[in-house]
Image (spheres, rainbow, N blue to C red):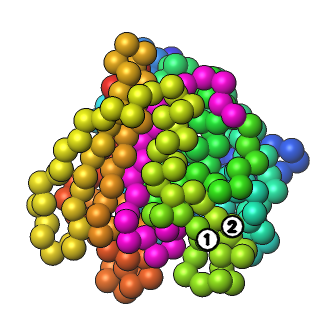
Amino acid sequence: FFANPANAGLVKDQVLNIDSLDRTYDLFIPDGDIGEARPLVLLLHGHFGDADVMTGENNKSAPYKVWLSIAQREGWYLIIPDGEYGSDRKRGWNDCRGNTRVNPKTDDVKFLNSLVDKVASQYSINQNRVYAHGTSNGGIMAYRLAQESSDRYRAVAAIVASMPEQNKCTEPTNPTSVLVMNGTEDPLLPYQGGGIGKNEFSQKRRGSVLSTPETINYWLTRNQLSSQAETRVFPNINRRDDSTVHLTEYKDSARNIEVVLYEIRGGGHTEPSLTEHYHRLYKRIVGTQNKDFEMAEEVWKFFERNL
C-alpha cells in the first residue's frame, strides 16, 4: 500500500452510509511511501462538537489539532468522525449512559468499526494498533468501544469523561489499556460523579456518571490489575493556570496492560495544552485549562507503548 501524495493531509467531508444514513468523517493521511502497516487513531468530539472543532478547521483553538502534526511525524492515520444529531439537535455519540435523553439513537459502535474497516481496506493499517481517543461525550464513547469492541481497540484515552452511572453496555471480553484525564474542578462532568451539566435541567437530560476514582476502579477490575501504582507530579510550568498535574499509573508489564490517570488538580472541562489555549470567555463556562503539558503528545506516547 502507498499513500498518494496528492491525497495526503486532511481529507474532509468523506461519507459512509450506515443503516441507510449518510455519516460523515474527515481522514488524515500522512505523506509519502508508507509501506508497512501503520497505527490508526479515532478522534471523537464531545457533545455540541464536530470534526472541524477537533482539528481547528473552525478557526478556533483546538488541542486535538496537535494530532495532525503527530500523525504526519509518525506516519499514523487519523479518522475524525462526526457524531449524529440527538434530540437536542446537537451532534453527539450514543455512548453507554442509560439515563440520558439527548444522545442520538444511532449504532455508533457499528459506525466507528465500519469506518475502521473502510480505511483499512484502502490503506495499510495495523489492525493490532487501532486506538480511540475522545473528549467528554466522545470520551465516554471511547469507553464504550473498550467495552463492546475490546477485541478491536488496543487502548483508549478518555478526556474529561467518566464511566456512566447507569451503564447499558455489555462487559468487555478482552483487556484494554485505558488513559483517563480529568479535572478536579470540572463544572460540567463532576470529578466526584453525579449529574452532567451545570443545572438540574441539564442533568436530567444528559444523565450521570461515576466518579473518576470509581471509573479507574472499574477498569482496574476489568483488566485484572492490582491497586499498586506509580505516581509522579508534572513540573508546574505555567503557574498562572491555577492547576497542577498528578499522574498515577497501574501497570502489568508482563501483559502490557495499564490504566493511567492524569488528575488535573484545579482543572476544568478542558484538554490540557501547551500551544492551543482556549479563550477566557469560553473558560468561564468550562473552567480552567491546564498549560503544563501537551495532551495529544501524552496520549500518543501512551498509544505508542501499547503495542
Say the numbered circle drawn on residue 195.
1
Is residue 187 in view? yes
User: Eyeballing the image, is 112 above or below 287?
Assistant: above
Please tell me which residue is depicted at 55% across the width and 25% down the height of the picture: 175
At mark 2, the secondary structure is loop
State the residue in front, 63 or 261.
261
Asked if the magenta segment contains residue 189, the reply would be yes
Say the numbered circle drawn on residue 77.
none
Quadrant of the image containing the C terminus? top left
Using the numbered discs, state the Cα–Cα distance from disc 2 to disc 1 in whole angstroms: 6 Å
Q: Amino acid at mark 1?
A: Gly
**Extreme residue toward the front, this view:** 227
Q: Position of residue 43 (x, y in %)?
A: 51, 47
Please tell me which residue is depicted at 66% across the width and 61% down the height of the picture: 92
- Occupied quadrant, residue 55: bottom left
- The crowd level at tag 1 (other Cα within 10 Å; few <14, some 14-19, many 20+) is many
Please tell me which residue is depicted at 25% across the width and 52% down the height of the picture: 246
Question: What is the tally of numbered marks visible in this picture?
Answer: 2
- Does the CB distance between marks 2 and 1 fall below 8 Å? yes
If you read the primary sequence from the N terminus, does the residue marked by circle 2 or circle 1 appear first? 1
Residue extent of the magenta highlight:
171-190
Type of secondary structure dominating the magenta stretch = loop
Q: Position of residue 232 (x, y in %)?
A: 19, 44
Residue designated by label 2:
207
